[in-house]
Image (cartoon, rainbow, N blue to C red):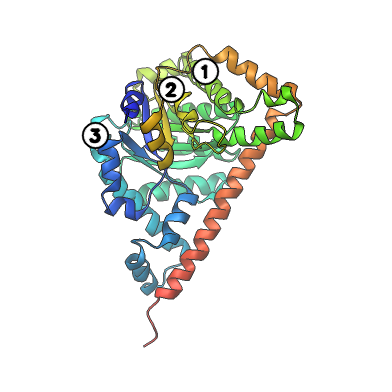
């Protein structure tokens, strides 16, 4: 067993777990991962909650109580998910305190059905922050067109945000701009900028999955040579954009007010293609002031045989640009791919949310008190 996870942390990569369930909380497993696997944060999404709650493990008593109160299925889901996030936040609180608020955070997502509604997203972000009521929460807002002004407004209200479903470099720059604009609003209101944090979740494996599918359809040797390179190249160029934005003159003004940089977070880091090493999106995306949120299988794979050899992003920008250009030369449109992935990402989370509504509604009916 190597201590690759310790080395990864020492390189400035915060290790977060991309999973949460009540069983993970109550069994002591989350505390154990923090203690032994260097985990310093947790991310959730509608798919994760759908899987956890539909398993039923540990939720029955709360669902029975909610059924007795005859709450709506939407309210039941909010009560269940915020309870898990609150408990996880309490477990991670010592990390939050030790890192000055940078880590020890748990993310919870706004209802994905609101992804194209700015005003409703802002209202939901406020409600979630109030419901969880922990300083070490991040509210997840998708990087849709409507999500951008919602990010600015939410940050401007002093609520920390995890921006999710980022696939394109252009959209990522818009996300950073939305964050900086939000901080400027918060500063104008006299809020303490040192207390406001954000991460930008840049998705990696899904880019390779979609581009590789198109490469395989072409079937040429030239095309095959480009397989499995676009996801990492895209993320590395995102880090280049991060370095540019957070060293700009505009940023310096906020830096003087003790604002925090919005860290890039590598999401979708579970490798989908068995032809690739299962630690690809960990080993090849090491750089200071980043977060890597991993499914449990990826976390243990990285611990067992991850190759952490120092910063693997510095000095790669020219090569990364060439790799994305090579994909374009094959006739595969980068812009089309990243827009498709954003649209599909929202649709997948909506589908998971709808499945969660159905399974929770069935449980509420099953556990409802009988008449009389």
Could you tell me how far apart the alpha carbons at marks 1 and 3 are, in whole angstroms?
Answer: 30 Å
Whether residue 80 sits left or right of residue 229 in the image: it is left
- Give 122 or 79, whichever is nearer the viewer: 79
**Percent coordinates x, y for residue 147 in the rendering:** 55, 40
Q: Which residue is found at the position 37% from the left and 72% from the top? A: 69
Q: Which residue is mark 3?
A: 97
Name the residue beneath numbered marker 2: 286
What is the crowding at mark 2: few (fewer than 14 residues within 10 Å), some, or many (at least 20)?
many
Q: Is residue 208 left or right of residue 215?
A: left
Q: Position of residue 329 (x, y in %)?
A: 74, 21
Q: Secondary structure at mark 3?
A: helix
Count residues near mark 3 (Cα–Cα under 10 Å), then give few for <14, some for 14-19, many for 20+: few
Distance between mark 1 and mark 2 Cα atoms: 13 Å
Relative to 158, 202 lies left or right = right
Between disc 1 and disc 2, whose residue precedes?
1
Q: Which residue is mark 1?
A: 240
Q: Residue at x 36, y 25 (%)?
A: 8
Judge depth for marks 1 and 3 and give the one in front. Answer: 1
Secondary structure at numbered mark 2: loop
Q: Nearer the viewer, mark 2 or mark 3?
A: 2
x, y percentage for residue 23?
Answer: 33, 55
Tell me whether the residue at label 1 lies in contact with that at label 2, contact meaning CB atoms closer than 8 angstroms: no
């Amino acid at each position: 067993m190597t201590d690759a996870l310790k080395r990864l942390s020492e390189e400035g990569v915060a290790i977060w777990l991309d999973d949460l369930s009540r069983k993970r909380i109550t069994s002591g497993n989350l505390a154990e991962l923090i203690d032994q696997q260097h985990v310093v944060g947790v991310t959730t999404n509608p798919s994760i909650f759908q899987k956890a709650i539909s398993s039923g493990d540990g939720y029955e008593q709360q669902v029975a109580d909610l059924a007795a109160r005859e709450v709506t299925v939407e309210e039941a889901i909010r009560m269940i998910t915020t309870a898990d996030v609150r408990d996880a936040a309490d477990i991670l609180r010592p990390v939050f305190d030790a890192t000055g608020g940078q880590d020890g955070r748990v993310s919870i997502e706004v209802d994905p059905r609101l992804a194209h509604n700015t005003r409703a997203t802002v209202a939901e972000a406020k409600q979630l922050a109030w419901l969880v009521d922990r300083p070490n929460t991040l509210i997840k807002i998708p990087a849709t067109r409507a999500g951008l002004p919602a990010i600015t407004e939410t940050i401007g209200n002093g609520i920390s945000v995890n921006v999710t479903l980022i696939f394109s470099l252009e959209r990522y720059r818009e996300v950073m701009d939305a964050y900086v604009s939000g901080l400027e609003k918060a500063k104008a209101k006299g809020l303490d900028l040192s207390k406001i944090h954000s991460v930008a979740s840049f998705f990696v494996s899904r880019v390779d999955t979609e581009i590789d599918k198109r490469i395989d359809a072409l079937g040429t040797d030239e095309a095959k040579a480009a397989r499995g390179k676009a996801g990492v190249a895209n993320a590395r160029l995102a880090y280049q954009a991060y370095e540019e934005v957070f060293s700009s003159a505009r940023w310096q003004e906020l830096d003087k007010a003790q604002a925090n940089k919005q860290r890039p977070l590598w999401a979708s880091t579970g490798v989908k293609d068995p032809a690739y090493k299962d630690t690809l999106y960990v080993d090849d995306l090491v750089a200071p002031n980043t977060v890597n949120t991993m499914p449990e299988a990826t976390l243990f794979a990285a611990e067992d045989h991850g190759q952490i050899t120092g910063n693997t992003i510095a000095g790669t920008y020219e090569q990364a640009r060439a790799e994305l250009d090579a994909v374009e030369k094959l006739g595969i449109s980068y812009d089309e791919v990243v827009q498709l992935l954003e649209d599909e990402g929202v649709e997948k989370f909506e589908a998971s949310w709808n499945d969660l509504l159905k399974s929770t509604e069935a449980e509420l009916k099953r556990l409802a008190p009988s008449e009389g």
